[in-house]
Image (cartoon, grey):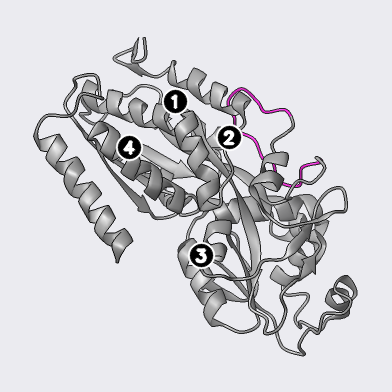
Amino acid sequence: MKKIFSSIMTLTLAMAMAACGGSATNGGRKAQELSGAGATFPLPFYNVVFEHFAQLKGDVVAYGGIGSGGGVRNLRDKIVDFAGSDAFLTDKEMADMAPVVHIPTCMGAVVVAYNLEGVKELKLTGQVVADIFAGEIKMWNDARLVALNPGVTLPAEAILPVFRSDGSGTTFVFTDYLTKVSSMWAGKYGAGKSVNFPAGQAAKGNPGVAGVISQTKNAIGYVGSEYAFAQKIPCARIENARGEFVLPSSATISAAASGDIPADTRTSITNAEAVGAYPISTFTWLIIYKEQNYAGRSKEQAAATLDLLQYVLSDEVQGMASEVHYAPLPEKVKGLGRTHLKTVTYNGVAILQ
């Protein structure tokens, strides 16, 4: 109740500041109302960041966690200021819309969470995870699971895989990983925001998947780490590319990003080769149009959007990431994000001078 009251007070304060024409910390411009939609994966992080931004700048930020696919559609339709996505846009997707820039906001993990009575630790390989979600391993006491988990009593019960019903960056990250570790999965199902899972139960959003797992014995599913931690759902140790069985943490997620990062930051860091890397790690992005004069948007609205993204890339905000079970961006990635923001224009003129 205290947290809800705090959120209401924050929103009320921000709206009051907007009505009064802004605050001294936004360069004298009128406070704006910004809207975004997309990934549920980083939603707990965004809730904290957007509240702090409202207190600092007076700009109200409304964000709808509708899944990465829905957020990108809203941006394509030009009805939001930004889209949140855990899946970077493909070359084809980018060719079908006006130029955009990807701004990384934090790093996180997709965990394989499970509900098994009395089982506090579970080890899984990528191939075994693929076989479970392909419906080829059907029972918890399957010989392959038993061999991976000596000394653990696994029940003679059917496995219930849980997956996303909506177009999801979390699904993209999970299936991108599976295509790298399982030729079977790559050949039959592939990677995407939406995949035709052959068995199990669908649920909407990361909250929906976490809810089904927490309430259903013998269930297993993929979910953003914060949702598993919040509901105290155990998650498996996953074998990485070096044969290490790793749990997600700020350190193991960060290790996955220790390799080369392309200038546009559109990269997958699943199944990274680094020592200690958690293998289902990812960046998540806010995506905006490079030319900000669209759909009747004002220059002040565009400036507020860039103020928000600069704030997300700040050391202050990145320091908040680990507090809500995400990992901060590496310095080189923050630098790439700031460079991209300098290319964003209004009527062809760079907004950041």
Most extreme residue toward the front is: 2
From the viewer's perspective, is 183 left or right of 318? right
- Residue at x-position 88% and y-position 53%: 243
Question: Which of the two labelled residues, at mark 3 and mark 2, occupies the earlier sequence position?
Answer: 3
- Residue position for label 3: 230
* Dot 3: element: helix
Gap between marks 4 and 2 measured at Cα: 19 Å
Q: Residues within 10 Å of mark 3 (few under 14, many from 20)?
A: few
8 w.r.t. 78: above or below = below
Question: Which of the two labelled residues, at mark 4 and mark 2, occupies the earlier sequence position?
Answer: 4
**Cβ atoms at labels 1 and 3 below 8 Å apart:** no
- Nearer to us of marks 1 and 3 is 3
Q: Position of residue 346 (x, y in %)?
A: 30, 17
Classify residue 302 by image quadrant.
Answer: top left
Question: Which of the two labelled residues, at mark 1 and mark 2, occupies the earlier sequence position?
Answer: 1
Residues drawn in magenta: 260-273
Question: Which of the two labelled residues, at mark 3 and mark 4, occupies the earlier sequence position?
Answer: 4
- Residue at x-position 69% and y-position 59%: 189
Which quadrant: the C terminus?
A: top left
- Disc ID at residue 99: 1
Gap between marks 1 and 2 measured at Cα: 24 Å
Q: Which three-letter amino acid code belongs to the residue tagged 2?
A: Leu
In front of the other: 97 or 353: 353
Q: Position of residue 130 (x, y in %)?
A: 75, 64
